[in-house]
Image: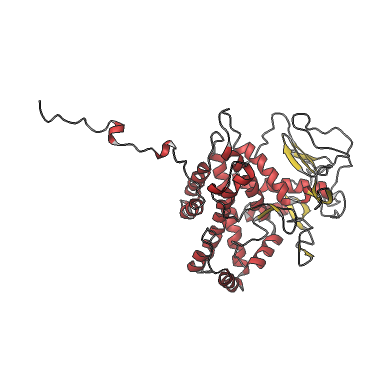
Amino acid sequence: MSIELDKRLAAEGTKFLLFPQPRFLTSSGAPLFPEPETVTVSTPPATILPGPADERMYVVDAKFKLPYESGLGGPPFDGEVHPPVTAGSDGHFTHLNPDSRDFAPATMYATVRRVLDIWEDYFGHEIPWHFEAAFARLEMIPLIEWDNAQSGFGFLEFGFGRTPNGTIDHDRPYCENFDVLAHELGHSIIFSQVGVPQNPSDRGIDYGGFHESAGDLTAIVALLHFDTFVDKLLAETKGNLLTVNGLDRVGELSDARQIRVALNAKRMSDVGAEPHERSLPLTGAIFDTMVELFQQDLVDHKLISAELRERSTNTPAGPGDLRAIAQEFAAAYEGNEEEFKASLLKARDQMGKLLAATWSRLSPDFMTYHDVFAGLVAADRAIAAGEHGKIIRECFAWRRIDLLPRTAQLFRRSLDDCGLRPAAIPTSL
């Protein structure tokens, strides 16, 4: 979402409290984010309904609900429910106590609406629901008795995390995990904007990995819209983002566990067909691209040297002397904190627009990662006159995301094959 639009929404939209990352995450025993951040969604206070709800989505705080079963159930939920959450006297929801039950439905609504606002801005248009022929609105159920979460046709329903011994941990509701909820919404965005394979002979191997990667990237870009998170990220890393940090750990479940790591060294030869595993090289290539865009802007503004940027890279050979790189980033960051933040937000928006343009052009049928790669290059050419093509190619090349060995695009054609060379003239009659 552009900084300008975010400012406009802050003046016109409805305010909520959101935690950028789960409250149970700690550093040296202290919560990473002890207080929520105030965020604004596009729905004006005058039009938001109890639930919360609006014309695109609604929250139902169901009682005693088990998960919808595949093919056997779905919205609308018609069982017993808790009273809908209502706005405060000022029309906003910032009055809610984070420890109250009402906070969970409000968080779920605000996260989905906020992420949708962000990505609709990047796409430049409303993102319709892929299920709109059957349901006008998305149903969201925040707290069901389940140690999992799922997105389905017309609904999102979330349970809780697990304790170390495998039981339901009611202190860790998934609906308050911004990464996880944003990831699930990412699937809905892809269903809407890319579609699903229609050919029954299409095994969809790369399509499955692409879906999981897109969910992770939806969450990563959206997470960078929290000021408190960006400030903490930069203060921690000093701008050296090619290190393990809170941005590249998608769907953090504890201080040491996460669903997937965006900063990884996986090549296509390292992964199989399972979608979550297969997503890693693609997510890694795009995450690397965003970080390289950030670092290139730092170089352009003479905040770091081109030589430091060259040494700070995520490749199998490694970035070199990690301690020296960290020290040089720390020296460059000191006194230039706002400039570093501006460069990171610029890279965030560049990547959001590139992804939206790429996803809009993709066909789901027989999709390969090369299609995504080529789509990013084409999107960069359309948006930025190809300024970042070299960065994109380099980040994808070492991941071995390229054409399949026997693809027709690699077949050679001679003049003889094209019928453009005259037949040999006989030397004698």
Relative image position of residue 220 (x, y in whole percent) = 65, 52
Asked whether, in this view, residue 361 is left or right of residue 224, the answer is left
Left or right: 23, with 211 as reference point: right
The reply to whether residue 119 is visible in this rendering is: yes
Residue 99 picture quarter: bottom right
- Measuring from the top left, give residue 65's x and y in whole percent: 85, 38
* 198 in relation to 338, above or below: above
Query: Residue 115 at x, y = what percent?
Result: 69, 48
Q: Nearer the viewer, residue 134 or 69?
A: 69
Locate the C terminus by quadrant. Answer: top left
Query: How is this picture coloured?
Result: secondary structure
Of the pair 38 and 29, the residue shown nearer to us: 29
Residue 393 vs residue 328: left or right?
A: left
Q: Is residue 136 left or right of residue 428?
A: right
- In the foreground, 282 or 103: 282
Q: Position of residue 167 (x, y in %)?
A: 83, 48
Query: How many tags in the picture?
Result: 0
Find the residue positioned furthest to the left: 429
Task: Determine if residue 300 is in view.
Answer: no
Who is closer to the viewer here, 333 or 266?
266
Position above or below: 315 against 160: below
